[in-house]
Amino acid sequence: MTWKVLSGNYAQSYAALLARAQVVSAYPITPQTSIVEKIAEFVSSGEMDAEFVKVESEHSAMQVVISAAALGARTYTATSSQGLLLMHELLHWASGMRAPIVMGVINRAVAPPWNIGADHTDTMSQRDTGWIQLYAESNQEVLDTVLEAYRLAEHPEVRLPVMVTEDAFYLSHTVEPVDVPSRADVDRFLPPREPHAVLVPGEATRLGSFTGPDHYVGFRHQVGEAMERVSKTLAGVEEEFREVFGRSHGGALPTYRTDDAEAILVTMGTSTTTARSVVDELRSEGHHVGLAKLRLFRPFPDEEVRALARQVDRIGVVDRSYTFGRMGPAATEVSAALYTAPHRPELTSFLAGIGGRDVTPEEVRRMFETLLSAAPPRTHWEDLEEAEEMRVHG
Amino acid sequence: MAKLTIPAQELMWGGHSACPGCGPALAMRLLLKGLGPRTLVSIPASCWTVIATPYPTTALRVGVLDNAIEATGASISGLRAAADALGLENVNIVGFAGDGGTADIGLQALSGMLERRTNAIYVMYDNEAYMNTGIQRSGATPWGAWTTTTPVSAAVHGKPEPKKDIMGIVLAHRPAYAATLNPAFPEDFDQKVERARALVGPRFLHLFAPCPPGWKFDSSQTIALGRLATDTGVFPLYEVVDGRLRITRKTGGLKPVTEYLSAQGRFKHLSADDMAQIQAQVRTDWEHLQSREREDLGRVH
């Protein structure tokens, strides 16, 4: 192992290098660019033995990795925000063709107005594309999760594409010490891809095809079945990861100080770190509060959420994006998971950190206070001071 | 009499679901004969999605990858990158896209593939409209043609805009090879496929692909109409290697375009003036092509 001081973006680049991705394709977008710049350096210096296809759009980047995966190559791409939205059509192609693509996504706000700050609207809009979604909290977790993502994507029980996300700037451009594993260890954890159902030159093979309703439903159902096997497969992959590297990241919904908690906040990505420190403060003051990190968003960890609900009366979900006409998207998912729970806690959807606003310790403290108040609201927006000002300006 | 040079090997099965007299079906058959079995074909949404037959069958004895309508250029870049990364040798990578999927919605991906110098063959089979969706006009539909979205009225004589010059656009990218092909001239067709196969880099084939239901002519006339297209100068046959253009079929003089136009229902509304206008344009284009050929021949190697 080697300690390196890396940004979240470089953690993605190093992971792609260590995973021995064979075909990389990307189009530049802020704040993803340093990932692919670093990979370009790796390829140029010969450190990375990959074909790097520099394309004219994100749409083409996704098509390049889909087609490369169709021939059996291990692939990597990265994007953010508008770029991810442009890929939307092809995200469905990737999962439908069972292409084990791994993609780094920097969570960034969606225009208009233009804003490059952290926001989860981009990936939340891809909820129904058949991609596995894993959200990282730290640069170490970014690197480790990308390596795990290849195992998950190529696993015979799964065979689906995976996106590994990180918050814009909080991770993408913030450096931390990262334990970069050795190539030998990564090779032990992640052997070369074993191609399954790929095109073979010289043979009559077809990927994609078209069907009537008779077979179509079967294809969709199989993707659904594979999704249902993800949570269990991830647990197994994490166990192997721990055996090789001596650490892991807690599966789909790692929890923190939830024993005897009266209120639990569910967070995603970097707001988790802030919330964890607030939980420690409040605990030291005698409050019974805890935390759950939603690491796996698709497939949604229903069982884990229901297990969490058994021990608590108040759950707050912190979303860095908003589903117009509903509430925070993670909150709607938690709410749906709780419908069949024997014990259903009160649920509040907190909208915080939208468009790159900091989720501060004071804010998290207020969320817990709101959660523990007599009648917690269904939805609560943070950071609306300027919104009031805008009303005055018209 | 010239010796028949077209390979006997069939890489397209019977039982495909093309219409009778389908130009794109003939074109695929001839193309694969020239390329051989170690060929991967990426096909966007188009008539050929359907012609290749539904899951779990296939009409082609080669590898076929379906792709989104606008993504063919990127798809063949991805296939080539993977073939190189995996050390797969002697594989022809082919994109086989319609005129709409190439000249309209797929133009960006095509331009990207040409600019990246992807080592692959991009084929545009040109049936001059969105035929799979039911004969809507595309950028490649010629001036004056009836389609369902360019209906004919007293005031409007079919499509009011001229056909997009896809070869001009492609040639601006300086491809390794570019040629026009017509299945009505199978030996010329096969020679060009062989030439394309032997070269490295981005190669582009513009295939003339008559569509009996879309152009409104009898399905027994596909070859006759194809010959007329070239012999009237509407679809001249030429190739460009290293920037040098060579016309590959020359006749003593062009036949009148009325012979080609009046053979199709999609042009039946055209007046004598309309036809004269088309004739003038075809003559100008043909003269331009001949002068380009003379210029290229005169250039020092």
Image: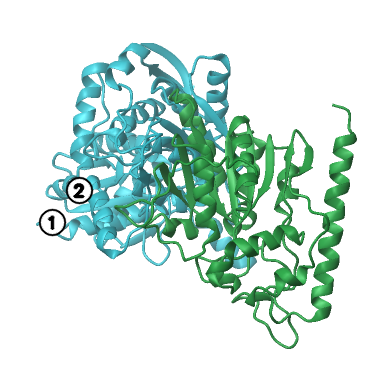
Q: Is residue A256 visible?
A: no
On the image, the x and y values in percent for residue B273 come to 84, 79
Residue at image coords 89%, 32% = B299
Task: State the SS at label 2.
Answer: helix
Q: Is there CB contact under 8 Å for labels 1 and 2?
A: yes
Task: State the SS at label 1.
Answer: loop
Quarter of the image where the N terminus of chain A is located: top left
Label 2: chain letter: A
Identity of the amino acid at label 2? Answer: Val
Identity of the amino acid at label 1? Answer: Ala
Q: Residue at label 1?
A: A341
Viewer-proximal residue among B185 and B215: B185
Residue B225 badge: none
Q: Is residue B298 left or right of residue A237?
A: right
Drawing shade for chain B: green
- Badge 1 local density, few (<14 within 10 Å), some, or many (20+)? some
On the image, the x and y values in percent for residue A162 come to 36, 39
Residue A305 badge: 2
Label 1: chain letter: A
